[in-house]
Image: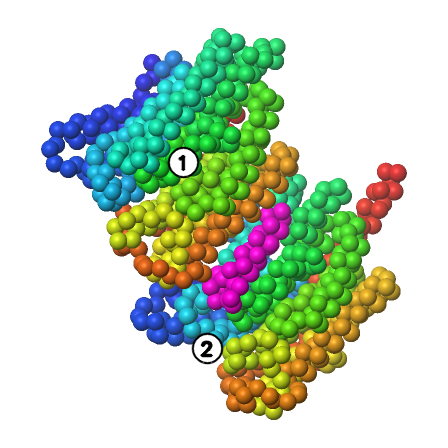
């Protein structure tokens, strides 16, 4: 059946939901329910994490195709199957989701005090949706999970968020939905042309160039909102600022990657001609995102907003990388996505640490924390450097590879893209200086406590991953080398055929 | 003479008369018993529909095929749900009268006749039988000014629509010389026989039927009647008669006037776009949840009409699947609305729901599922309805309709998720009164169907496909 000998991916996908059902059944007074819900959620997500490690060890990195494939009939007469599988591109995203979920649950251990049961339930449902989406090998299955993410995330922002949570939640929901429904039409059009929604089949279907243009635009509407690309990024700062810490972590860590993953899974390999055609547009939007949002980040007075804007800039680097269509660029984009998934999550957790203590995210409210919180200052520093792309941290490898890939396309693209690294250093160091250095002037900051053991447990895996990715990148990039290589080759072959065809016709 | 094909209708009518007699002759309060008997009769009819024979009968005026069986089953289930949600409401609101379920039963007989109509006359008879019963139901709370107003308004406008329909029928008859569907199809196969007068007749027909499904621009009555009628009647009107009228519209357009696709397609496209736009935009400003549901139903009709506009079996399949998902979502939503009662008083404002997730998490969860489903968010059933509708639009190349459809569904999503917002994000108010078992049954049953539809879509999609193919022989 597959390399694991049992339906591993289905188990990974649906186990969190089972945990959620268990939580639903808990009875008792509020404190008991809360505590039971926390522990059930944590254990469920840890079991899922342990199971997902099978993917890490048993995944055959030399195989560019899909592995651990499982399928069951769903709507067989209409070309829709329940089909799951992972390849080099998706496998690490599955792991990213399963790693971040227990971290989020642990990070919300004390921060969330009201309606804990519903909160944990929402997170487990979210995990099901995320894992299912990255594993889906059928477009309809993908779409169901892709949009299903909206429901738990909407509730997480809206119920446990900050003062403007309602506005942020509805904005998040409507922005994302608008993009997705256009993708639904593209999905239907593809199904009509290919007669199947099976992703491996679609990957080998050649769509006529005129159709590709429209399909690409529909996909763009969906994935650009998710990434998010300028100018449809405005939902992100609102959602990040209002969401509870763990919500921001998942949003930055996994949900933004759904856009990049969508480009890599659908737009580039299925629509090579349109992708090549629209690449300049994508470069332009990405460059604007990198430069403009970096400058905007510099002017922020709210920590979370600053990191949110930096996310947009970092994801701009990802989209540049994807649309270079060469191995370095795409590998860099993959690396940058994973690295950003870890680093941005960690930065939001860093904000969460001081927010839990002081209940303010205003940068001016802090200063001189190094005196009272040395461990925190160290962790924050590490992730600040990683976010800037300092060599030895994960951030460096991704940006470097993307710039390398961009250089192959155009000198100016690489130059403008590298502006993001410089500006990134400016706003991150500026943020760090204002929060950690300086004098402790505020009364309540004099008694602030350093990281608790629970918080250390939250940060430890992220620190290890950041350094590991920075020092030994090939243990990660090895996963996707074959798949990315095959994808780039396929892309160039498809372009060559089209050019040949065009030559014959003229 | 193949009279056995109408056995379900005959049995149901006889049962209705028997229940009526029983109610009249009993001196004590028989509302609950009659309701139970009605539900029993509806289920019996459903069994008869499943096991019944198919074919034409009554000189070609009546036909039973898989399309009509599909619709009849759906109508019977919807009517049974309607009777069940009325049980508790009528007790509380002093509408404990045995005529109530009986009227619903006779309306259902009318709808079954509509589903089986294969002649313009049968079509009209079924429609009127259904409408008359529903007019009375809308005004059933006779001491309530709003209910009487709703009944009167519905009656006057309904009579106007019936007039339009009859006028259309007479024009069609005048220009073709027949009212039987199969004869009409034969006659109209010859383009030379299609005259301007006939097309005018068809337009009148569509207008009359569009009134019954409350499509724009014949929707004016919907918000007022939905708001004024007793809530279980609104629940009933929103489901079963919609299904029957939509089935009628589909059958009339597909089989006798199938050759006139070019003529009526533009009309349906126009009505569909207008319904989707109005349904999604006008609902935003509503504070009363029954009015909101009225606009939402207008929007849903707009989506269903996309399937009809496609004018092929795929489109009709989409309409049928949409109808199935819509019936359960709607019945469940109204069960939740009827459960909105505080200290014995019915509540209808959206703001009354605030903080429901704290005071009654179960009800809030089901309500939220229905709202997400209506907004078309997967994996709930509402998404699958839209999926199969848009499949048809894309396949037929109705791109404009598809794009307008998905975009208005986003606008619609705004007001659906606003209800979720009120329930989950706002601070709680006093709890609702305890929910009776009958409402929980409908809410949970429909909720499970809505939430778990994605696990077993194949049988329903298959049945809808078989039903749709019948119309296109």
The residue singled out by tag 2 in the image is A110
Residue B398 sits inside the magenta stretch: no
User: Can you tell which of label 2 and label 1 is closer to the viewer?
Assistant: 1
Name the residue rendered at 53%, 40% in the picture: B388
Local crowd size for mark 2, using a 10 Å CA cut-off: few (<14), some (14–19), many (≥20): few
- State the image coordinates of residue A52 (x, y, percent, origin top left): 55, 69
- State the image coordinates of residue B270 (x, y, percent, origin top left): 58, 30
The quadrant in which the N terminus of chain A is found is bottom right
Q: Which chain carries label 1?
A: B
- State the image coordinates of residue B133 (x, y, percent, origin top left): 31, 27
The residue singled out by tag 1 in the image is B224
Location of residue B177 with respect to A152 vertically, above or below: above
- Would you say residue A165 is visible in this rendering? yes
Residue A181 sits inside the magenta stretch: yes
Magenta range is A155-183
Tell me the chief SS of the magenta region: helix
Which colour assignment does the render follow?
Answer: rainbow
Q: Quadrant of residue A285?
A: bottom right
Callout 1 secondary element: helix
Mark-to-mark CA distance, 2 and 1: 50 Å
> Hey, which residue is sitting farthest left in the picture?
B27
Name the residue rendered at 79%, 66% in the picture: A417
Location of residue B427 with respect to B147 vertically, above or below: below
Horizontal side, residue B162 vs residue A358: left or right: left
Name the residue rendered at 68%, 83% in the picture: A433
The quadrant in which the C terminus of chain A is found is top right
Location of residue B387 with respect to B364 vertically, above or below: above
Q: Which chain carries label 2?
A: A
Which is more toward the observer, A490 or B59?
B59
């Amino acid at each position: 059946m597959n390399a694991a000998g049992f339906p591993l991916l289905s188990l990974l996908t649906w186990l969190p939901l089972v945990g959620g059902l268990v939580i639903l059944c808990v009875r008792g007074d509020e404190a008991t329910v809360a505590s039971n819900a926390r522990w059930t959620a944590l254990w469920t997500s840890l079991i899922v994490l342990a199971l997902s490690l099978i993917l890490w060890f048993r995944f055959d990195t030399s195989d560019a195709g899909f592995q651990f494939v499982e399928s069951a009939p769903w709507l067989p007469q209409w070309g829709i199957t329940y089909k799951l599988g992972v390849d080099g591109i998706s496998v690490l995203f599955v792991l990213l989701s399963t790693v971040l979920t227990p971290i989020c649950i642990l990070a919300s251990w004390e921060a969330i005090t009201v309606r804990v049961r519903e909160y944990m339930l929402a997170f487990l449902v979210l995990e099901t949706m995320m894992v299912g989406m990255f594993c889906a090998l059928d477009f309809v299955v993908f779409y169901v999970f892709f949009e299903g993410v909206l429901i738990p995330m909407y509730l997480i922002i809206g119920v446990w968020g900050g003062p403007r949570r309602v506005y942020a939640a509805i904005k998040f929901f409507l922005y994302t939905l608008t993009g997705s429904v256009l993708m639904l039409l593209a999905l239907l059009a593809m199904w009509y042309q290919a007669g199947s929604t099976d992703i491996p089949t679609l990957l080998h279907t050649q769509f006529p160039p005129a159709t590709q243009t429209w399909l690409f635009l529909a996909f763009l509407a969906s994935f650009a909102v998710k990434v998010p690309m300028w100018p449809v990024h405005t939902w992100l700062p609102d959602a990040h600022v209002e969401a509870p810490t763990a919500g921001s972590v998942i949003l930055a860590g996994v949900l933004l990657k759904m856009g990049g993953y969508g480009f890599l899974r659908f737009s580039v390999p299925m629509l090579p001609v349109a992708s090549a055609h629209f690449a300049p547009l994508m470069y332009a939007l990405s460059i604007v995102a990198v430069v403009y949002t970096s400058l905007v980040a510099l002017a922020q007075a709210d920590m979370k907003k600053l990191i949110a804007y930096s996310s947009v800039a970092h994801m701009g680097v990802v989209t540049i990388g994807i649309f270079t269509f060469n191995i370095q660029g795409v590998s860099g984009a993959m690396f940058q996505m994973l690295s950003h998934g870890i680093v941005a999550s960690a930065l939001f957790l860093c904000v969460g640490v001081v927010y839990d203590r002081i209940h303010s995210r205003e940068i001016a409210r802090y200063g001189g924390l190094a005196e009272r919180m040395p461990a925190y200052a160290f962790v924050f520093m590490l992730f600040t450097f990683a976010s800037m792309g300092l060599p030895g941290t994960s951030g460096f490898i991704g940006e470097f590879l993307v710039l390398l890939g961009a250089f192959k396309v155009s000198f100016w693209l690489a130059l403008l893209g590298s502006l993001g690294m410089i500006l990134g250093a400016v706003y991150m160091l500026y943020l760090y200086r204002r929060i950690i250095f300086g004098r402790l002037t505020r009364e309540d900051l004099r008694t602030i406590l350093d990281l608790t053991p629970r918080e250390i447990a939250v940060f430890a895996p992220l620190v290890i991953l950041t350094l590991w990715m920075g020092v030994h990148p090939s243990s990660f990039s090895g996963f996707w080398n074959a798949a990315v290589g095959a994808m780039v080759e396929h892309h160039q072959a498809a372009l060559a055929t089209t050019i040949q065809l065009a030559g014959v016709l003229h | 003479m193949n009279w056995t094909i109408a056995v379900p209708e005959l049995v149901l009518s006889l049962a209705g008369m028997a229940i009526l007699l029983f109610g009249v002759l009993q001196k004590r309060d028989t509302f609950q018993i009659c309701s139970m008997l009605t539900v029993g009769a509806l289920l019996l009819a459903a069994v008869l529909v499943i096991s019944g024979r198919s074919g034409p009968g009554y000189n070609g005026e009546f036909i039973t095929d898989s399309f009509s069986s599909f619709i009849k089953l759906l109508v019977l289930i919807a009517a049974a749900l309607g009777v069940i949600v009325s049980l508790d409401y009528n007790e509380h609101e002093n509408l404990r009268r045995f005529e109530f379920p009986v009227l619903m039963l006779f309306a259902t007989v009318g709808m079954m006749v509509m589903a089986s109509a294969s002649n313009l006359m049968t079509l009209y008879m079924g429609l009127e039988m259904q409408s008359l019963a529903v007019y009375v139901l809308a005004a059933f709370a006779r001491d309530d000014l709003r209910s009487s107003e709703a009944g009167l308004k519905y009656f006057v406008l309904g009579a106007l629509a019936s007039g339009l329909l009859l006028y259309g029928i007479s024009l069609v008859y005048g220009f073709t010389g027949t009212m039987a569907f199969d004869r009409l199809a034969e006659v109209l196969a010859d383009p030379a026989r299609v005259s301007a007068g006939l097309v005018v007749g068809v337009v009148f027909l569509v207008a009359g039927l569009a009134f019954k499904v409350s499509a724009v621009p014949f929707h004016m009555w919907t918000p007022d009647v939905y708001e004024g009628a007793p809530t279980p009647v609104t629940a009933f009107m929103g489901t079963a008669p919609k299904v029957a009228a939509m089935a009628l519209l589909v059958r009339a357009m597909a089989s006798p006037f199938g050759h006139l696709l070019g003529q009526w397609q533009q009309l349906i496209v126009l009505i569909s776009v207008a319904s989707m736009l109005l349904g999604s935009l006008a609902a935003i400003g509503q504070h009363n949840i029954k009015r909101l549901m009225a606009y939402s139903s207008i929007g849903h009709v707009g989506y269903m009409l996309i399937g009809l506009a496609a004018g092929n079996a795929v489109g009709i399949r989409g309409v049928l699947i949409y109808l199935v998902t819509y019936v359960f979502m709607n019945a469940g939503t109204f069960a939740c609305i009827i459960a909105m009662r505080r200290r014995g008083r019915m509540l209808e404002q959206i703001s009354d729901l605030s903080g429901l997730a704290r005071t009654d998490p179960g009800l809030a969860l089901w309500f939220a599922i229905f709202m997400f489903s209506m907004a078309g968010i997967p994996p709930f059933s509402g998404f699958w309805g839209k999926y199969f509708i848009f499949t048809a639009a894309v396949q037929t190349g109705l791109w404009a309709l598809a794009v307008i459809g998905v975009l208005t569904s986003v606008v619609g999503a705004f007001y659906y998720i606003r209800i979720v917002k009120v329930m989950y994000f706002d601070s709680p108010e006093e709890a609702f009164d305890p929910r009776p078992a009958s409402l929980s049954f409908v809410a949970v049953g429909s909720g499970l169907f809505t939430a778990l539809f994605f696990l077993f879509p194949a049988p329903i999609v298959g049945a809808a496909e078989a039903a749709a193919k019948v119309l296109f022989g």
